[in-house]
Amino acid sequence: MNSINRFAVVVVGVVGASGVAANDYIPQPYVGAQYGHTNFNRGALNHVNQNHITARVGAEMFQLLGLEARVGTGFTTVDKGGNRVKGRYNYGVFGVVNLPTDTAISPYVLGGYTHVSTGINGRNFRDDSAAYGLGLNWNVSDAVSVNGEFMRLVDNDWSRQSTTAFGVKYNF
C-alpha cells in the first residue's frame, strides 16, 4: 500500500470515528468585504497608517475548517518623512479555523500566504510573506455575519504590515 492510500485510509477512519455526517462535507461558500487600517513599516519608514478595502471569497468545510482568498487595495496616499507611500494592492490565500460556540459570536484564526505591493516615492516594493491573524464573527442572521479581525499581512526582513479590519460576510 503506497503512502497516498495509507493517508486516505487514515482520513476515512478519523472522519468515520468522529461522527461527522455526510452533509458536513458540503462546502458552504461565502463572499465578504472589509474596511481596514494598515500599519506599514519598511526600513526607516515606520508607522505609516493607511486605509484599505478587501474582498473575500471562501468556503467553510466540516464546520471547523475553511479556505479563503482575498484581494485588497489601499485608497490613501500618505506623506511621511519626505516619502509618499501608497498601498497599491495585496492578495492572499488562507486556511481558516472556526472555533464553534453556542452563541452568535465565534472566534476564528487564519494563516496562509500574502503578496503585498506598496508604492514609495513612485517605486513599487513587493513583499511576500506568511500571514496570520485572528478575529470574531458575529452572526446577525443565518446568512449574514459581521466580523472584526487583526492580521499580520507581512512579516519579513524588509517589511512589517499589520491590519485591523471590520467587515461583513454573506453565506450562501
Image (tube, rainbow, N blue to C red):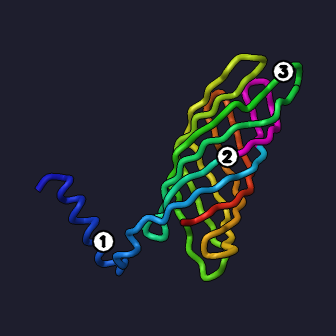
Asked whether 120 falls inside the magenta stretch, the response is: no
Say if residue 47 shows up in the picture.
no
Instruction: From the top left corner, tell me how far across and down residue 103 is, in percent.
Output: 65, 80
Instruction: Give the mark nearer the N terminus: 2 vs 1.
Output: 1
Number of the label disc, if any, that sits on residue 83? 3
Corner quadrant of residue 102: bottom right
Q: CA distance from mark 2 to mark 1?
A: 36 Å
In the image, taking residue 166 as reference, residue 23 lies left or right, namely: left
Instruction: From the top left corner, tell me how far across and down residue 98 is, in percent.
Output: 55, 66
- Give, as a three-letter code, the residue at label 3: Asn
In the image, taking residue 30 as reference, residue 159 lies left or right, namely: right
Q: Residues within 10 Å of mark 3 (few under 14, many from 20)?
A: few
Quadrant of the frame with the N terminus: bottom left
| Residue contact at pointers 2 and 1, CB within 8 angstroms | no
Q: Give the foreground label among 2 and 1.
A: 2
Relative to 99, say whether 94 is above or below: above
Q: Residue furthest left?
A: 1
Q: Name the element at disc 1.
A: helix
Residue drawn at x 66%, y 23% as measured from the top left: 125
Residue drawn at x 71%, y 57% as measured from the top left: 167
- Give, as a three-letter code, the residue at label 2: Thr
Q: CA distance from mark 3 to mark 1?
A: 55 Å
Start-end of magenta stretch: 38-53
In the image, taking residue 68 as reference, residue 7 lies left or right, namely: left
Instruction: Give the mark nearer the N terminus: 3 vs 2.
Output: 2
Q: Residue furthest front?
A: 172
Which residue position holds label 2? 54
Instruction: From the top left corner, tell me how far across and down residue 62 is, in percent.
Output: 43, 69
Q: Name the element at disc 3.
A: strand
